[in-house]
Image: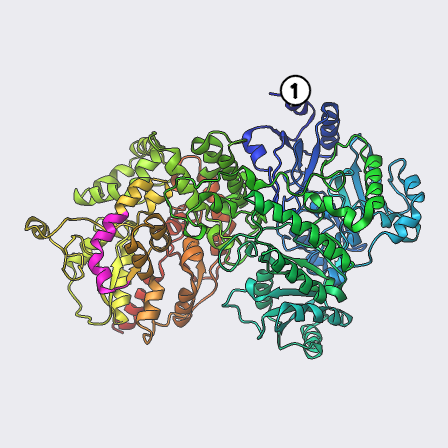
Amino acid sequence: MTDLEAELRKVVRGDVGFGATARALVTMDASNYRRVPLGVVAPRDADDVAAVLEVCRAHAVPVVPRGGGTSIAGQATGTGVVLDFTRYLNRLVSLDPESRTAVVQPGLVLDRLQEAAAPHGLRFGPDPSTHSRCTLGGMIGNNSCGAHSVAWGTTADSVRQLDVVTARGRRLRLGRDWSGAPEGLRGLVDGELALLRTGFPELPRRISGYALDALLPENGADVARSFCGSEGTLGVLTEAVVDLVAAPPARALAVLGYAAEAAAAEAAAGLLPHGPLTVEGMAADLVPSAVALPRGGAWLFVETGGESPAQARARAETIVRAADAVDGLVVTDPAGQRALWRIREDASGTATRMPDGSEAWPGWEDCAVPPARLGPYLRDFRALLTEHGLRGTPYGHFGDGCIHVRIDFDLLSEAGVGRFRRFSEELADLVVAHGGSLSGEHGDGQARAELLPRMYGERMVGLFERVKGVWDPDGLLNPGMLVRPAPLDSGLRFSVLPREPVDVAFGYPADAGDFSAAVRRCVGVAKCRTAAATGPAVMCPSFRATGEEEHSTRGRARLLHEMLAGEVVTDGWRSTEVRDALDLCLSCKGCRSDCPVGVDMATYKAEFLHHHYAGRRRPMSHYTMGRLPVWLRWVARLRAARAVNGLAGVGVLASVGKRLGGVAAEREIPRIAAQTFSGWWRRRRSTGVDGPLVVLWPDTFTEHLSPSVGRAAVRVLEAAGLRVALPPTLRMRGRPVGDGRTTSAAALLGGGRRGRVCCGLTYLSTGQLDRARTVLRTTLDLLEPVLAAGAPLVVLEPSCAAALRADLPELLHDDPRAAVLAARVLTFAEALERLAPDWTPPRMDLPVTGQTHCHQHAVLGDAADRRLREAASLSGELSGGCCGLAGNFGFEKGHVEVSAACAEDQLLPAVRQAPDGAVVLADGFSCRTQLEQLAGVRGRHLAEVLAEGLDRMTAPK
């Protein structure tokens, strides 16, 4: 333990972390930069903050305040001690509806403030797209803005008082009329009044530099306002009094289509006299093709407010009529508005990938010009991109003249970094030529601070340095940011990654087979750190359960990044830090769909476990639950289901078995079916249905644990006119599609090799990739006649369907049959919709509740299921999230508490709140097991519900 760490532990009541994990998690923010800290402290109160500053000053160690870590210019990283305010200093201290103010701590997430203010008809005005995870302290540090700044301004416009601790331990309360000003600041300002009155451009989004003009007497000498945007370089914020604004009771969204982004940009300023709440712009490259938008190649999202829906709509319709747009529409439905805004909010992530899949990066994410200059500026900006051979898709706050863009810089090669610098210098000159600010929202940090002399001149930048000296004479706070900056092309986070491809098992087709590129996908926008899931979203259940960064998708990606870098995490694939962080990953695949850049942590986890345990003994659960298909087949062959169930019911024997098998003592062992699904199939009489052929996949769970689901599916599929077969159990060259009835006699006669199809799910989830590969190749061999016949495969278990559709072609990327099989996989609802489009399901007239399976949400989609439920008159929405059992995860020792917390996030509350008589739908065996064990509720597969409806229709009356 270092002297610094020991002294901090003596004086700090909060958490002190100097280990590899704590440091690795904060080496980066959402920028291109990486700085490795000595340690991380999570202070409990202002006294802890003062104590940290005193110790660090004595050791000459820098201190960097950090909130949500979503800064885009590098200002939330540091080489000394990082202060993490999100763990403890994260409360809403008070809210006064009468005065429309709130007292907040710096680690409070913006959405928590909005939720508390909403019942009073109030809100905090600024709302960055990261509102579900950014903190008020970070917003004050960066002077954040958001989409509604045309109505409610920047964070500085909403700040009334700030409590800060200076680097030398003084506690100040900042406000107007020089309140809380450190000694020497007023004299410094009084000596430079002329410069302060003439040296700042007039535009709504000037964030660059220190806001020293707020200290002018005609501006109220507002020390709190001047502190906003100082990026943690002047003092450490411990509490803030902020103003709230009245939220319009009703809103409408006018969506205006334009031929191109320049036309949309030129039109934006002309809409401001109508008093909109937002004027946001996006181009076609960032909009999913399925989204229904007006005609055009670029769009403005113009939100209006009103005392009633009619008034809000009327104002939106006025804007549509006034706009010189190609096309337009007004959206008043709240769900429709949320869907459109979600596209805009995800742009900071989706923009990191160009249409061809190549990478794009921040660096010039948010410069701003006067709104009237936005059109000409964008044309010049595009020309500059072309001149340098670069690409980017602008979007953002067109009404304020602020543009976000990710650019396909090559930050991996020396030549590419050189071009990054040259472009940055020329773009800075271009922004200044249009009267703009290098930063219009996210601050200067390391990305732009070096270029501030081009905007302000040497004299003003010199004044910035003198002001920094008044506040922080020892240069302790966030050095290298804003003043005396580090070079904009130094400390790039990509420079430490391997230059040669890493030897991996999966193919990573979206990343050209490069695992480093896959890990680079995480740019730090931290959507995975959203504490409260809403709607169908899944990501990230383990973070919502623990609140720990290392259990977020971003945290795990950061640890993998540092594992590849080898500086902080030094053991490579053998790293215990990475293993422990991934231990609570449920492999729910939610990040694959919900992460704006498609980080796929479930695949990365499987890859890591494959290497981590190569040649070593694995956890016992990998041998028991990880090889579940093997054990269950032996039980079936020996006809030992009743014996195993009986032994599992004997308390002492069950306890010993669970302990030896790595199963949590709190869990009940699911009962094995006395008759397997395929056993039932062999004994049933043929129905003679002669419709389109479908091959029904006998997954391990349906086969051995819930064959009733398989029987119900057969009932429904045949009622829909489909001819059902089971996959071959014998590899027979040149033979027709098998039906699961193959006899051992055929094998004795030399007809082929016996086997059973398997998706490899349990091997994949435990990282037994060599075994998974063998199992999947056997499956492909067995299914060759099915593939040759072109028959579709209906898979009832969503996790198995997802494994076949996504994991199979990525793991067996060298086998063309894998992609063919993946393309043939259909869910139960998809099979009915595509192959029996004229079939009408039984009318159930029942409410439903439950949860969309996480793998179905992430990989398969549930649109067909929704339509099937509607056709069957099954009303109600299913929740998002993850049930928390997640195959072997919830059964393993040490996971029960997190597993239960995940279920309590959305699934169990949805079931408790369901109307009387509601059917609990749960297509996944894990989901049904979790419901039964935690809530005593029986969940049912949709096939079972429809089969029951068919039986009612045919039952004698």
> Percent from the top left, x then y, of residue 191?
94, 43
Residue 129 colored magenta?
A: no
Q: Secondary structure at mark 1?
A: helix
Amino acid under label 1?
Asp
| Residue at x 47% of width, y 65% of height | 876
Q: Residue furthest bottom?
A: 321
Q: Quadrant of residue 236?
A: top right
Quadrant in the picture for the C terminus: bottom left
Dot 1 crowding, Cα within 10 Å, few <14, some 14–19, many 20+: few
Quadrant in the picture for the N terminus: top right
| Residue at x 45% of width, y 37% of height | 583
Judging by the rendered image, the residue that carries numbered circle 1 is 3
Q: Is residue 665 visible?
A: no
Q: Quadrant of residue 857?
A: bottom left
> Percent from the top left, x then y, of residue 804?
33, 54
| Residue at x 73% of width, y 71% of height | 271
> Percent from the top left, x then y, of residue 948?
31, 65
> Percent from the top left, x then y, of residue 81?
66, 31
Q: Which residue is more in the foreground, 921 or 385?
A: 385
What's drawn in magenta, residue-wise?
776-792
Q: Is residue 641 left or right of residue 129?
A: left
Q: Which residue is more in the foreground, 224 or 211?
A: 211
Q: Is residue 301 left or right of residue 851?
A: right
Prevailing secondary structure class for the magenta stretch in the rendered image = helix
